[in-house]
Image (spheres, helix red, strand yellow):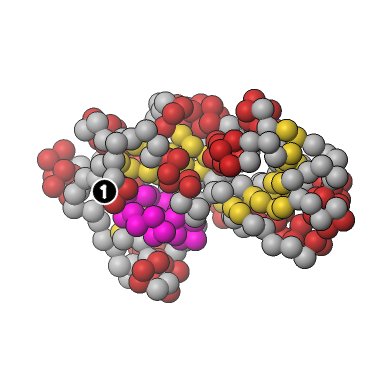
Amino acid sequence: MSEHEGAPLSFPTEFYDAYIFDMDGTIYLGDELLPGVERMINELRRRNIPVRFLSNNPTKDPHQYVEKLERLGLPTDISDIANTVVTMTKWLKNHHPDAVVFPIAEEPLIKAFKKAGIKISEDPAEIDFVIASYDRTFEYRKLQIAFDAIWFHKRAKLIATNPDRYCPFPGGRGEPDCAAIIAAIEACTQTKCEMVIGKPNPEMLVEAIAGLDVDPKHCIMVGDRLGTDIQMAVRTGMVSAMPLTGDSTWQEALALDKKDQPTFLIDRADRLIPQTTWDDLGWTEDNWK
Ligand SMILES: [Mg+2]
């Protein structure tokens, strides 16, 4: 606990109607569940409280999250998972069903667009939206198409899957994320990205609780990033908890205006379960395995 010394930790004392979780840095780091996650999720499910998972990462399709959670010991229904592959596809279908798009993206997003019947093109003269995403196959050719579509033809708008600067890895490393691709396109076209569908856009939360008969004010959002997970909860008026197991630090949280701070700062995920239930179940900080 010493690394959290001085942190103003505070824990929920009641259960909420639904729990929405970020994954990376909140539920797991790399290929390991974080301490207390498994028993916490199992306890919520035992009480029939809905649990949903939400990721900004557009490089995986929801099936890959199902497989990963299953492998880590948390079998989960695909309908309980939403990421920016799901939300970007739905947003286009709902708002611009006839648009021609150029996704700067990896296979899962492109596949989802094709499956949804969204028209994809590499011809700058007919592109309506250039869609920046977390794309590890980004190259000069793609930048040129985006540049021609936005700057030369003055036709396309720039939108993006997520605002993240990097994706965290275990050991403190990471990979450049969507913010780098947005910046490259903005720099050469001198335009601004017009919409980012991922967290902190409240559209993500709407999607996460879709189909649940719950009031967002009685739900809790749990995530390790202030600028995305927590900010989305703030914009939606939802209670939030930030575990100190991922990206943002408690010092960064305290530096924000009070209204932008997480409701709860927790040192581990099972603090979401009220202390009275810890006592009833005989939980201690050490017996979580
Ligand atoms: Mg995270």
Nearer the observer, 192 or 128:
128
Could you tell whether 241 is left or right of 62 in the image? left
Give percent across and percent down for residue 68: 50, 31
The residue shown at (25%, 56%) is: 11
What amino acid type is highlighted by mark number 1? His
Question: Splitting the image into 4 quarters, where does residue 256 fall?
Answer: bottom left
Q: Taking the image as drawn, is residue 13 in sight?
A: yes
Q: Is residue 235 magenta?
A: yes
Task: Report helix, strand or loop for mark 1.
Answer: helix
Up-down relation of residue 174 to residue 260 (above or below): above
The residue shown at (42%, 26%) is: 77
Which residue position holds label 1? 218
Give percent across and percent down for residue 142: 82, 46
Could you tell whether 116 is left or right of 14 in the image? right
Nearer the observer, 242 or 182:
182
Could you tell whether 282 is left or right of 2 in the image? left
Question: Splitting the image into 4 quarters, where does residue 85 fall?
Answer: top right
Nearer the observer, 130 or 257:
130
Highlighted range, magenta: 219-240
